[in-house]
Image: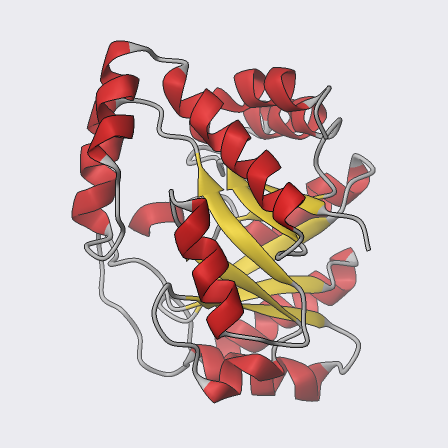
């Protein structure tokens, strides 16, 4: 099976899809499919289902992320109906970041979302996120897993060896765009390990984060341990595409 690169799109916070279309057009030379976050980092964004439909309209494959934080059961069923009307049939279900405004709902869990979606349509392809620590048994019922972003290939390989599963697993790779980005990431995800050497390199050279992420993608591919990567290029998608276009 081919090594897949799933590119995460930065979703728009305004009713304008121009930048999204540019990301899709640029990264389509190397991406097998695109993940669209859902109210990214706790902010309101254009619907992930709508953007996944836009990806499909441009000839790509979209994976709509849906979180349990922002919806009750009725709202979730509405999203599944909307996705079916748009022809979107791949989802990543997640818990969701702390919201910047409003409160978290408690009607759904990722587990109940998977169960509800299976009942709605057995043909849907459903994924879940895996932390760098344990892997609950119920998550093995997902059709694919996204391993939490990490910056150590060795640590990701150790996780993969410790968690044998029969579904595709995609390792999380993120471009550190700046030292400030690195610090905010560390504050938002306490258990993420950011190599200080990499942070220092990024502070001195704006391309260092791009180079490190691309090298990590290629190392993971060469390891043969993962089915692909979930790549988060943030605002550096042009640089990432330029670096990986001739290497993948």
Q: Is residue 230 above or below residue 102?
A: above
Residue at left 35%, top 29%? 176
Q: Is residue 238 above or below residue 195?
A: above
Drawn side of residue 222 relative to residue 72, left or right: right
Res. 54 in view: yes
Name of the residue lying farthest toward the top = 205
In this rendered view, identify the residue nearer to me: 43 or 179: 179
The percent position of residue 1, horizontal first and vertical second, equals 82, 55
The percent position of residue 109, horizontal first and vertical second, equals 41, 80
Residue at left 22%, top 60%? 102
The percent position of residue 26, horizontal first and vertical second, equals 67, 22
In this rendered view, identify the residue nearer to me: 70 or 208: 208
Drawn side of residue 85 relative to residue 48, left or right: right
In this rendered view, identify the residue nearer to me: 197 or 15: 197
Res. 9 in view: no
Picture quadrant of residue 121? bottom right
Q: Is residue 112 above or below residue 209?
A: below
Picture quadrant of residue 140? bottom right
Residue at left 52%, top 68%? 161
The percent position of residue 239, horizontal first and vertical second, equals 54, 16
């Amino acid at each position: 099976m081919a090594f897949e690169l799933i590119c995460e799109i930065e979703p728009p916070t305004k009713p304008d899809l121009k930048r999204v279309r540019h990301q899709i057009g640029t990264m389509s030379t190397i991406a097998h499919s695109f993940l669209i976050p859902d109210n990214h980092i706790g902010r309101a964004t254009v619907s992930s289902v709508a953007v996944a439909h836009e990806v499909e309209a441009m000839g790509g494959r979209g994976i709509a992320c849906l979180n349990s934080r922002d919806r009750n059961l009725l709202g979730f069923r509405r999203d599944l109906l909307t996705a079916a009307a748009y022809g979107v049939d791949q989802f990543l279900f997640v818990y969701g970041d702390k919201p910047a405004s409003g409160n978290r709902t408690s009607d759904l869990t990722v587990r109940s979302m998977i169960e509800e979606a299976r009942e709605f349509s057995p043909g849907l392809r459903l994924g879940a996120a895996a932390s760098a620590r344990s892997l609950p048994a119920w998550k093995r019922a997902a059709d694919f897993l996204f391993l939490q972003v990490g910056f150590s290939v060795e640590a990701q390989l150790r996780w993969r060896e410790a968690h044998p599963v029969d579904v595709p697993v995609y390792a999380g790779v993120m471009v550190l765009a700046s030292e400030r980005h690195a610090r905010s990431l560390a504050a938002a995800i306490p258990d993420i390990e950011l190599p200080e050497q990499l942070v220092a390199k990024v502070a001195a050279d704006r391309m260092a984060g791009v180079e490190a992420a691309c090298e990590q993608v290629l190392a993971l591919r060469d390891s043969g341990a993962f089915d692909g990567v979930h790549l988060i290029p943030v605002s550096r998608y042009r640089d990432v595409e330029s670096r990986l276009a001739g290497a993948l």
